Amino acid sequence: MAVESHELALRHHFADPEQQRQAASLGMWVFLATEIMFFGGMFCAYLIYRYWYFNEFAAGSRSLDITLGTVNTAVLICSSLTVAMGVRAAQMGKNKLLVVLLLLTLVFGFAFLGIKGVEWYQKYEEHHIPGPSFDASDLIREYPQIHIDPQHSQIYFSLYFAMTGLHALHMVIGIGIFCYLTYFAVRGRYTPEYHTPVEIGGLYWHFVDIVWIYLFPLLYLIDRKPLG
Amino acid sequence: MSEHIVSSKLYIGIWLTLLFLTGLTAGVAFIDLGPFNTVVALVIASVKATLVVLFFMHVKYTSEKLTKIVIASALFWLLLLLGLSLADYTTRLMR
């Protein structure tokens, strides 16, 4: 393995390992730029509909579980710490620590998806999943002071499921990437000279965390204040 | 020239700040600030995102200027997308 990892260290078309590392990192950033545009379209749709159907968005936002949402935000922030510490362990050649931190990241990742699953199930039980069985009568009863059109409520929940679903899909892909990284970290592939996969896998994970950092206030928090 | 290794103390400091800001934004959401609720929530989210990008994603320490150009252009295109779309939809008289 030592020989293999040494050969992996430098491709012939790069001048030195530093240039190779920076090229890989830059490539990842270009990919993340396309991801910003990808999620940007959904955020744009959300902002426009929220501007049009503010009452329905306020009521929908209030029906989400703020405790689970906040806990999930904290879980993702903890996972970002373990990723950052993992990259640091790889830079310093502390392989055992790297494996532990990668496994911890996976635990946080699965915890996030589990909590998200509980929240989705709550929405299923409340008939808040858009479609033939959608029912907003509980929201209409709860907030008699504002006018709620069930069709517009469906738009809020459609966007909620599309945005959190797309984010969860990214989490699933991230967990796949981190399983791959853990497998090769256990086999001792990553060294202070060559740990680019850990670094760019980490960039991806942090990006998915940032998307959630914006989804959390937009979906859960913005309309919590007392209704006028 | 080699990579910059960030101290674990700094990472833990950033982590605690991010957790604090998460609690803060959840708490402030219940206080009626009028139209500023949205502004405060998005400002806190942006501070958190900036901390993650600068420290966890090492952008503060990178010597590669191209990375910064890629980030700046991604934000610029996002601003165009959101800014021009909202400039249209928020100024229409009829729906």
Image (cartoon, coloured by chain):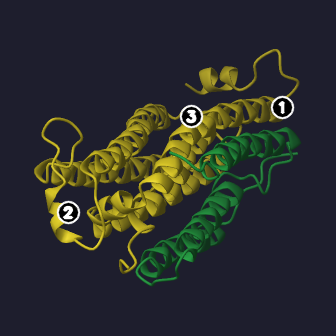
Chain colours: A yellow, B green
Q: Chain of mark 1?
A: A
Please provide percent x and percent y for residue B85. 64, 43
Q: Which mark is residue A44?
A: none
Please provide percent x and percent y for residue B73. 79, 40
Image quadrant where residue A220 sits: bottom left
Q: Are marks 2 and 1 on the same chain?
A: yes
Task: Decide if residue B46 is on the left or right side of residue A63.
Answer: right
- The answer to whether any part of residue A70 appears in the image is yes
**Residue, x 38% and y 79% (percent of image)?**
A228
Q: Are marks 1 and 3 on the same chain?
A: yes
Q: Which residue is mark 2?
A: A140
Q: Which residue is mark 3?
A: A38
Front residue of this view, candidates B95 and A203: B95
Please provide percent x and percent y for residue B65. 88, 43
Q: Are marks 2 and 3 on the same chain?
A: yes
Q: Chain of mark 2?
A: A
Q: Against A89, is A78 above or below? A: below
Front residue of this view, candidates A214 and B84: B84
Foreground disc of the pair 1, 3: 3
For this orientation, the residue located farthest to the top is: A12
**Residue, x 20% and y 36% (percent of image)?**
A131
Callout 1 amino acid: Gln
